[in-house]
Image (tube, rainbow, N blue to C red):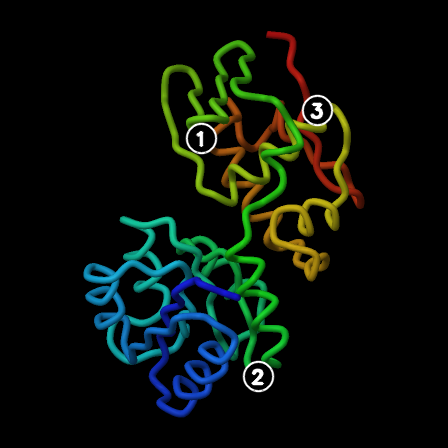
Amino acid sequence: MNTATVLVVHDEPQLRRVMRTTLTDIGYTVIDEKTGEEALEMLRRTPADLVLLDLNMPGIGGLETCRAIRETSEVPIVILSVRNTEREKVMALDAGADDYVTKPFGIQELLARIRAALRRSPTAAESDLIVYRDGDLEIDFEGRRVTLAGKSSRLTPKEFDLLRLLAANINKAVPHRKLLQAVWGPDYGEETEYLRFFVNQLRKKIEPVPAKPRYLVTEPWVGYKFVKGTG
């Protein structure tokens, strides 16, 4: 039985009714709002375990709503949109989304994405790493924080899961598909734009020169590798 609370934010009443009925029938608790402003007010009063957020809404819109949620919460956010370009997906990820589902979508696809967003990544069990130090770089996996040359940055949940998996396979190239399925779930494997975005975000936090990565390197046509330095 599912016990999570899902906040559905969409301006179409019919879609909200369908989502409420479908998700409630399989055990989720569902809250729905029609605007970003109402969603933000609801989240201030009632915590949710997941947010399904439409990109195109009147008022402040989906991207701004996503940014506002992310300022105070790490709740998983799944964007719903009719737009299917890589640029739109990257903009959503940059705003703080965890996933992006293109409309029209099948209900089973959406349910799989919800389960993936709610699950805990298995990467924490794959490594005993607590702290990694190399010269000016320190990665505190327990505290989910990176310190580079005295400047501290907190890792987002997806950044943490991705970096921990790569660090657990230090000096080994991890294929795109394995990274996606380990961090997002078994239904993933083709969303390489997700990896490019989060790897770029990680490089800004752990690399002395992000444009010339020393630790988090690309293996062309394969995946990514975390390279142990000499510090």
Q: Residue at x 24, y 76 (%)?
A: 59
The local crowd at label 3, few if under 14, some if 14 to 19, many if 20 or more residues have their Cα within 10 Å, is: some
Q: Residue at x 19, y 61 (%)?
A: 45
Gap between marks 1 and 3 measured at Cα: 18 Å
Outermost residue, front side: 1
Q: Tell me if 169 is positioned left or right of 184 in this view.
A: right
Amino acid type shown at disc 2: Pro
Expressed as whole percent of the image width and height from the top left, the position of residue 174 reads 75, 37
Kindly indicate whether the residue at mark 3 contacts the one at mark 1 (C-beta within 8 angstroms).
no
Q: Identify residue for label 1.
A: 144
Gap between marks 2 and 3 measured at Cα: 40 Å
Q: Tell me, for residue 112, which label it has, or none.
A: none
Expressed as whole percent of the image width and height from the top left, the position of residue 63 reads 36, 64
Number of dots carrying numbers? 3
Q: Identify residue for label 3.
A: 170
Kindly indicate whether the residue at mark 1 contacts the one at mark 2 (C-beta within 8 angstroms).
no
At mark 1, the secondary structure is loop
Q: Residue at x 45, y 81 (%)?
A: 19
Q: Which quadrant: the C terminus?
A: top right
Q: Identify residue for label 2.
A: 104
